[in-house]
Image (tube, coloured by chain):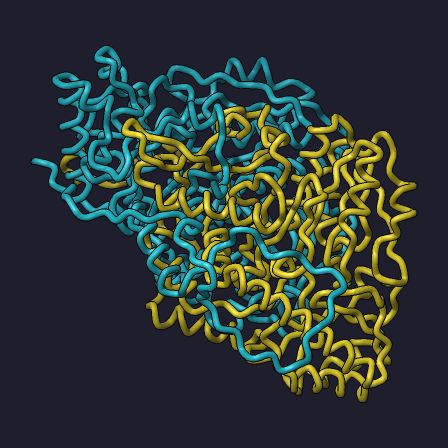
Chain colours: A yellow, B cyan
Amino acid sequence: MLDELGLESIDELFSHIPEYCRLTRPLNIPPGKAEADILGYFRQAAAECAPGFTSFLGAGAYHHFRPTHLDMLIGRGEWFTAYTPYQPEISQGTLQSIFEFQTMICQLTGQEVANAGMYDGSTALHEACMMAARVTGRSGFVLAKSIHPQYREVLQTLTRCRDFPRQEVAYLASGQVDLAALKKAVTAETAAVAIQSPNFFGTIEDWEAAAEIAHAAGALLVAVVSDPVSLGILPPPEAADIVAMELQGFGIPVGFGGPYAGILACREKFVRSMPGRLVGEARDGEGRRGFVLTLSTREQHIRREKATSNICTNQALCALMASVYMATYGKQGLRELAQQNAAKAAYAAQAAAKAGLEVLFPAPRFHEFVVRLKRPLAEIEAGLWKEKIIPGLGLKRYYPELGDALLVCATEIIPREKLDQLAKLLGGAA
Amino acid sequence: MKPTRASRHIVQNEDLLFEASSPGKKGYQLPELDVPPAHLPATRKEIPDFPELSELEVIRHYTRLSTWNYGVDTGIYPLGSCTMKYNARVNEAVTRIEGLGDGHPLQPEALSRGALRIMHLLSQQLLEITGMDAITLQPAAGAQGELTGILLVREALKARGDARKRVLIPDSAHGTNPATAAIAGYQVENLKSNAAGTVDMASLERQMTADVAALMLTNPNTLGIFEEDIHRIADLVHERGGMLYMDGANMNALVGRSRPGDFGVDVMHLNLHKTFSTPHGGGGPGAGPVAVKRELEPFLPIPVLTTRDGQPALEYERPRTIGRVRAFYGNFGMFTRALAYIMANGCDGLLQTTEDAVLNANYIRKKLEGSYALPYPTPSMHEVIFSDALQAPKGVHTGDIAKRLIDYGFHPYTVSFPLVVRGALMIEPTESANLPEMDEFIAAMKAIAEEAQREPETLTSAPHTTKISRLDEVAAARSPVLRWKKI
């Protein structure tokens, strides 16, 4: 090839790089390793990450069973080595799957349109709030303090350079957001009221009551959902104007926090203010149905600085995992799955109460609940690790006012004897 | 040589999931519930029209759909700027190992040592590759990396007591750059390119004023050209109190050959899904680590990866941090893949990858010069940009050439970008294209150039061999149908 180019050496292809910009030594990185050695390195690292433990951690990342065929399907090169379907004639697989995805998200959330995906739940909340600001022409955000703390942190970071007053509203002893305080906090400047259900404590909120408060003041209700499995059984956020949801629970690996996928769903009248990719139906010259990326004039590659967002991905492969998961569980399965999750958590909470622990927040809950520990988590957790148990998330960092509180999540994958064992250990040790 | 890549093969039709559903079918099996059912005071009605399929039907559905796609595994994927390189299977395998694939982001540090070591090692190697001082892996994608980087610039300038209003962006930049600067609250100012396709120093001299916070520069730029004046650019920006942001989208042209940290860059992002081979997945997920010089380090998002008692650990107490940009630690599964890629290549392999990518682009450039117009004679690095100027008089445009390429069995190049070239054909073969397949691609492009002169209508109505032909995108946008509904 060098001959074809009339070159003596490969260096000539880099000769236009000024000398002071050239790296004249080899990178200080070890030489290439064999595949077996690479696997060995990662296996060893994995062994230091508590494999085989029973984990009661949830808090925005949920251990659900992932059907075996899921990874085998998305592992086809035609799915995971393709790129954004800018050329619809050879991307109909991706495009049709996204159209189906958008439809299933609408069916699930009770909303009219859904986009093709955002980075995750935390950034979806930010995008939903910004979208509400565009729609209403206002700038204030009123947020329930029971929204995932990291979601609220992300919103704070990403809006810090603009003037968006934020107000947080406390939770009641029931675990639900204080609706009276929420009502007081909402003003004529409020763009979005945001609540999460099930909220960070696992408590189920009342979408309609919150929507009424938001709408009475001309604001939009942003509904945050951190585990989509909950929508198999709980009333969907139909009353909301925008839904910001994390999809990880639908077959996306917990994998130390990512990659996940978020979505936005909303009323049809707001679609042109919505960020993110959208797939729509189209016809070819012979009238055959196909699918294309559409309404791109909202997006950065067309609108540049006037775009609705700078986002340039839809986490397509994660969205595809969620699609395969939804199609597999289907209408009956999602309901049964959600019921099992609620049942496991209800049983675990009851067992904890029987073991003498105080269970906080009595309002109805989904698959998470909060208990007050008898002794600080730091004093008892090493003992639990010996039993190969991660008991849940200590809430000191996020809600110091709750004292030694522990957020426990029990999904369908945890057998009854482990629920009993946790209650016994926490009740006894603590 | 005659292009022979395309052939005929059966393509199956497949309905939408909802159309293929039948009431009562199920594709799942849950274990028997071993606790009493829970009582929920309010439950939803049945999800209307949600799919009901058997497991095999689900598998056939997604398998059939997949055959309508084209991926790197299918063949050369010369999508300029996107860096469609080979995605090794071992990278997928390591990501799914028990302990990593199912590790919880909130599990105690003492039970996450392996994951933290992976993040630490990847960070160190990315710093070595870029020549920068500190790094965050948290941003979820390139565009979020840009936003993180610009927020860091904003804080650093505020700390200097010199908050500024504007960001300069060359007209050849990705759309994410101006969109990012606008979201970060800056006014965007366009910087014109010169005849060589690089930053026009006279314009920069004029526009780089005391209220410009940063210049967002892609190097090599989207024309595949190295900014030879980079040192003068960096010096000018610094002298006038601004910062140099580098969009690292094209870092795959530099790895092992040149380091942004050595040519004056203050802050940059990397796209792990481009340079470091994490799969594009049909449109994500990616990951957009941001590397910075010392001055910006105090502002990095929390948690920051550090070492405590000789072990990698997470630090949350950072008083000057901009805060979090994403929940948890970012796209960890992309870190494992990128690290496996770096390990497999090693220092020699990384360098060779860069060299092969540049060699391949220049080979294609040489072979297609004459058949297609070359708007900038400046040397190319990892990608080459032609224009449709020789075909346009026949009514054939870059989009038509791209569609015709599909008939020859190839994925098109990037169409109509960068915007500074009228009718751009942006070709990036990457190091993954082998010589025989590149020769076939070149033969197809030459055959198309001839067709454009002889039978332009074959191109303007292409593709002719796909499952569907050109779709009416205008009608689709005019009255959008964004979901299936039962009729």
Q: Residue B106: x percent and y percent?
A: 67, 65
Residue A418 placed where, x, y %?
Answer: 65, 84
Please state the horizontal and vertical placement of residue A195, each as a whole percent of the image: 76, 49
Q: Nearer the viewer, residue A376 or A220?
A: A220
Q: Name the residue at the left extreme.
A: B1
The spot of residue A324 in percent (x, y) is: 45, 57
User: Does A360 appear above or below B350?
Assistant: below
Residue at x 14%, y 43% (from the top left corner) = B7
Q: How many marks?
A: 0
Relative to the observer, which residue lies in front, B171 or A262? A262
Residue B62, by quadrant, is bottom left
Q: Residue at x 63, y 70 (%)?
A: B311
Vertical relation: B274 (above or below) A133: below
Query: In the image, A242: left or right of A394?
Result: left
The quadrant where residue B35 appears: bottom right
Q: Is residue A56 left or right of residue B97?
A: right
Q: Residue furthest top?
A: B393
Query: Is B13 left or right of A354, judged from the image as shown?
Result: left
Quarter of the image with the N terminus of chain B in it: top left
In the displayed structure, B191 sits above or below A222; it is: above
Residue occupying image coordinates x 30% and y 23%: B398
Residue A303 seen by the camera: yes
Residue in the picture at 45% in, 18% down: B193
**Can you see residue A31?**
no
Compare residues A194 and B479 and report the one nearer the observer. Answer: B479
